[in-house]
Structures are given as C-alpha cells and as structure tokens.
Image (cartoon, rainbow, N blue to C red):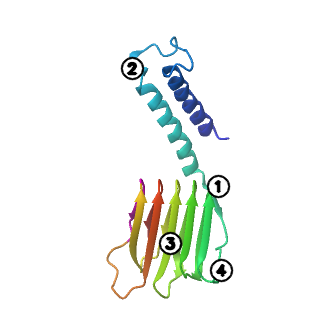
Amino acid sequence: MTKKTFWGIILIAAGLLKLADMWNILHWEWLWSQPWTEYIAPALLIYLGGDIIINGFKRNRDQWLDRPVPVGEDGKRICCNTKYGGDQYIYHGETFHGAKLDASFGGIKLDLREAVITEDEEIDIHTFFGGVEIYVPTNVNVVVQSRSFIGGVGDETNKGIKNDAKTLHIVASNFFGGVHILN
C-alpha cells in the first residue's frame, strides 16, 4: 500500500465518521463542534480521499499490465475483457481487424498508432464504471457512435483527414464510464 492510498483511506474514514455522527450512529459532538463542519467537512474529506487514491493509480505505471493482443474466435478481431484492473494492448506493425473491448471497474489502453489498418474497421466498446483509452494513427478517420449514461466519449483526433482514408468506427456503450480517443 502506498502512502497516498493510506492517507486517502484515512480521509475517507474521517468523512464517514462525520456522517455517522450526523446520523446519530456515533456521538462525537466534541470532535465536530464547529458549525461549518456540518456538511462541508465530510464532503471535503471524502473528495480529497478519493482524489488521492485515484491519482495514486493514475501515476502508477505498474497498474497497466502489458498483455499480448488477444485474438477472438474468428482469428482476427481482438476481444478484451478487464475487471478491477487495467490492461494495455500495443500493436507493433500487426494488422488490425477490429476489437470488442469490455471494461468493468477498470480500464483498457489500446495503442493502434503503429497498427496496419487496411480497411474500415469497428471497435465495439462497453464500459461499466470503467474506461477505455484508444490511441489511433494520424492517417485514419474516426467516427463515433455513443450511448452513455453518466459517461461519454472524448474524441481528440485529427479531423483534417482525407476522405479516401480508412475509417475506425467506434461504437461505445457507457454506464458510469467513458472512452478517450487520441492520436
């Protein structure tokens, strides 16, 4: 456990103790006697604790496990399923034939910058409290279709691509999750 994770847990516990005191589960009036601590302190403590934990994971490069590209049943399209963690798939000159990515309570990084894209392909994405980050080559068009509930898709790719370039069709269904597309 890192120091940031430890302090994040301490701050969240302090916020939850304050809520327990407010709801008369615990009686610690002497600890929270200031009027401004009624609602601001527990919200602030929970926010800071969660922020410290999340930023600890973002900065920890060991979180992402480099895995070989998983080929699906058809022998071409890749299928990735991540739960409670993070996986990273990087193409190094291989031909890309589409993907199905599922991220639940975790994340997937898919790096296609060095992939060979010979025809229009589709990436089907489903997130549930998770996220997917996709790096695409600069010479492909990206078309996004998204159905999201408290989530979304961020497309930061080049938009000045020629009409005859290959297209990646990204179909995303997000439930408290998101997709980030970059060059």
Q: Which residue is mark 2?
A: 36
Which amino acid type is marked by label 2?
Trp
Do the numbered discs 4 and 1 sit on residues whose CB atoms are within 8 Å? no
Which amino acid type is marked by label 3?
Asp
Q: Earlier in the sequence, mark 4 or mark 3?
A: 4
Q: Which residue is mark 4?
A: 73
Which amino acid type is marked by label 1?
Asp
In this picture, which residue range is highlighted in magenta?
Answer: 150-157
Q: Nearer the viewer, mark 3 or mark 2?
A: 3
Label 4, residues with CA under 10 Å away: few <14, some 14-19, many ≥20:
few
Q: Is 76 left or right of 138, judged from the image as shown? A: right
Report x, y in % for residue 31. Answer: 52, 15
Report x, y in % for residue 47. Answer: 47, 36
Label 1, residues with CA under 10 Å away: few <14, some 14-19, many ≥20:
few
Q: Earlier in the sequence, mark 3 or mark 1?
A: 1
- Secondary structure under tag 4 reads loop
| Residue for point 45% across, 26% down | 41
| Residue for point 33% across, 85% down | 163
Q: Which residue is mark 3?
A: 124
Q: Is residue 106 above or below residue 163?
A: above
Q: Is residue 155 magenta?
A: yes
Q: Earlier in the sequence, mark 3 or mark 2?
A: 2
Label 2, residues with CA under 10 Å away: few <14, some 14-19, many ≥20:
few
Q: Quadrant of the C terminus?
A: bottom left
Q: Nearer the viewer, mark 3 or mark 1?
A: 3
Q: Is residue 31 above or below residue 96?
A: above
Report x, y in % for residue 171. Answer: 45, 71
Do the numbered discs 2 and 1 sit on residues whose CB atoms are within 8 Å? no
- Secondary structure under tag 3 reads strand
Q: CA distance from mark 4 to mark 3?
A: 15 Å
- Find the residue positioned furthest to the top: 30
